[in-house]
Structure formats: structure tokens, C-alpha cells
Amino acid sequence: MGFHEEPKPPKEGPNLMVKSFLFDRATMSLIGLLLPTVQNIKVLSFSDCNLDCEMLRLLAQGLSGSCSVESLQIEWNNLDLPLPNLEEQEVEGEEGEETSAFDRASSILEARERKRYTLQSERLLTNFKEWLESRFGSLGKAWEALDKEDEEAKLTAPDFHMLLFEKLGVSGSQIFEVFEVLDGPDYGADGGGVITLQVMKEALENLPEVDHAEDEALEEDPLGASLASFLQPSTVLECVSFRACSITRVEMGPMCSALAKCPWQLRALNLWENRICDRGAELLADALDAYRGLEYLGLGRNRITDLGLQALCQPFKPTQLEEVDVAPARDRITKQQAAAKSVADAKEKAQAQGTEFQGRQRRVSVPLVDELEERPATDAAGSPSPSFFLRKLSELRCLVLSENPIRSADVLEAIQPFGPRGADLLLRCTPAAAELGMKRPELLKEKERKPLLNLGQNLGHGKDAAAPPEGWVLRLNTF
């Protein structure tokens, strides 16, 4: 009696995962040189490795050419600002004091480190200030939630975290980071592990004013630029994950600029558990309007509210055209159709020649054909006056906004019909999902999670059962 050996499952390329390892730049430079020759690694993961800006740039340079890596995961990796350059007067010693070259070099390095610490402290506190302003509208209203007797109380780090959670509703690792900054040398503390709320109030109120009209300057942010290097049009990556990297709207500037250049190879971007606020969501919305090839965007556990949700959904909403814009829109759609047909013909020819599946396949930039819809209407005199609506199509299949402070069920109902056809909108563990679940319990029981409405019905097309479902597929379950 013979034994039949079961066929083994197909072997996939190995994953390279590094956890809690301290790299230096020489090692990362070597990795960057070797990566273009790698042909059997698909997933590259660095977790809690404290990679700095220069290391990330060296890594990004290696992810090019015929490199086989498809997915990059960088997790729990807070970035430090690069050492700043100093003016000569900032490092001069006391007048008449003679110092050796070694001592002078040491003093310059110490001064640069000191300045970097101050800049990073201001950056952290500015983000914390914007967080409070987004929750309360202004710092003044946030202070109203605090008791007078609490201001002079001496608080340790756990007490500080607990008090801010109870009174201001903020918690997490950034609270402890704020405590360490306030307990440091820049704010009058002696590092004894005890501060007061008064110190926090004075520090936040005396921060340099941020000119919101100069957001173009964010594109040159060094931290954001290092992350954006993985999102360039030349990328070989299909999936990029920056999970728990303390990314704020400042870093989002260069990243969104890179996305707007349409890196068509990139399918998925995960930004779970960062510090992205509504202003960061607005930057992302502009990028999504330009690059419509992204299939998955993960923004769970950030600081996005109803305003940020509305901004993110705006690029997918049909827009009504003026009469003068209809003809140019039709011409543009005709060109898109011709380009799409050209790509389809090239693909069919490659299949016929048997050359399509040789080597790793790059994602083809298929032109998305916009839709122009004419809707009958009449003017005030009763004469026919049709309206024209333009819908820009998108490859987006899933947008995750779970565990964000999104509160209004009315906002969900308003934006739902206008999403990409059948795309999932995950809102688990949000106040809005809980409210809408109470209002519409059938949404929690519906296994297929059909959309709330049909876009055609909502815009006057009537209740056509044969019409394809439109809009976001809301997922509200708490599990």
C-alpha cells in the first residue's frame, strides 16, 4: 500500500521583520544598497527601531528598480528633527576664553542638540495645543473645563494624565510626552517629576503663532519629507504602513504632495494610531482628489472629527456643472475613453504574445473615465432646463475611520450616498456609529451591509430597483 503525499501549498517569498533593533546609518546604507537586488522578500517590517530621517531616506533609495518588496511597515517609530545648523554667534564662548578644537567641537554639538530639543518641544506642544483647540474651539474654553483649585496642584505624570483625561477628555502617550517637556529645562522645572497646570497653560499660550496661510511651507518639513520618500511615483511599493509614528498634519504636507503626483503602484496606505486632525484630513482630501488609484486608506484612531470626515468624502461627491463647463467635460471624457481603450488594447496584445506575466508586474495606470449625467429639470418659467453632474471615479475600496471622535449620525446619513460605489466606510467605535446604530438598528444586523440609500433615488431618479447600489457601505459594528 502506497502513501500519497499531499501537495504542498505554494511557497511565498519570506518576510523580513525587525523588532526593537537599534540601527546605525552605515547598516541602513548597506541595506539600501542590497535591496535593489533582492528578489524573494515581499514584506519589510521595522517595529520600534528608532529610524531617523536619514535612515529612512537610505531605505527608500533601495526600494527601487526590480526590488521585490511589495509592502513596507514602519511601526512605533517616532522621528526626531535633524540636528539644526547654528549661526556663529550661537556657539561663541565667553569673551577672551581660549578653548581647544575638541572642546569647541563638543560645545557646537551640544548647542545643536540643545536647539533641536527646544524645536521638538515647541513642535510637540503646538500639536497638543491644536488638539485642545479642535476639541473645545479655543484654549480659553478648554481652561473653563478645569477647576481653579487644580491649577496650582503639584501633579506627577500619572496624576497629570488622569486629570487631563477626566477634565479635558484627552489621553494617550502624547500626554506623558507633554509632561516630560513641561518638566524639562525650557519651562522652569528642575526635572523633579512634578508640574502644575499653570505651567502647562503658560507654555501653550506663549507658543509662537502659527500662520495657517503658509501651509505651503509644510512641504519642506524634514520629517514629512523622509516619510514622503516612500510615496513617490517611482515607488515599487504597493502597501505602505506608518502605524503609531506620531504623524501630525505637519508631516502630512510632504506626504500628500507626493500622493498628488499619482504613485500608481501604491494601492494601500495605513496611518493607524497617529495624530492626524481635521486639517490633516483636508490635506489628504486634496491628495485623494488628484490620485484616484488608492484602494485602501487607514485612518483609524486619529483625531478626525465630523469636519474631517466631510472633507475626506468631498472628492467623491458629484459636482454640478455650469453650462459653459459641460462641453469641456465631454471632451475630457472622450479623451479618457480613448486612453483607457489604448491601455486595454495593449494589455490584450501582451496576453496574445504571452509576455504579460514575465517578471514582477507593475500596476498599469489605467485612466479612470469620469461620468457625466444629465438630469431633467425645469426653470422658473416651466421650460426644460437640464442639470449636469460630473462624477470622478476612484479605485478606493475601503476608508477606515474607526475610533475617531466622529459624533454626528446626521453627517453620516448626509455623506453616505455620495461615496465611491460600494466602497466600505468603517466607523467602528465612534460616537456617530453608536448613534446611527440606535437610530437604524437594521444596519447592525445587515450581513451584506448594503448602503443606506440609492444615489439615483436621492437625486430624483425614482426608486429603480434595478439601479446599482451607490455610495458608501457603512460598517458600524463595534467588533
Image (cartoon, grey):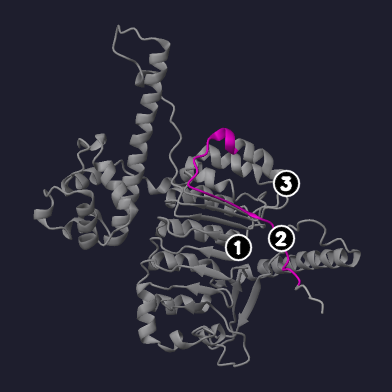
Q: Residue at horizontal 62%, vertical 80%?
A: 374
Cα distance, mark 1 to mark 2? 11 Å
- Left or right placement of residue 251 versus residue 370 in this view: left
Please state which amino acid type lies under the numbered disc 3. Gly
On screen, residue 368 above or below 376: above
Q: In which quarter of the image is residue 466?
A: bottom right
Q: Residue at horizontal 33%, vertical 35%?
A: 118
Residue 65, numbered label: 3
- Element carrying mark 2: loop
Tell us which disc is closer to us: 3 or 2.
3
Tell us which disc is closer to us: 1 or 3.
3
Cα distance, mark 1 to mark 3? 21 Å
Q: Which of marks 1 and 3 is nearer the N terminus?
A: 3
Report the span colored magenta: 7-28
The residue that disc 2 covers is 365
Q: Residue at horizontal 45%, vertical 85%?
A: 443
Q: Which of 241 and 317 is in front in this view?
A: 241
Q: How crowded is mark 1: few (under 14 residues within 10 Å), some or many (20 or more)?
A: many
Q: Which of marks 3 and 2 is nearer the N terminus?
A: 3
The residue that disc 1 covers is 294
Report if residue 1 lies within the magenta region: no
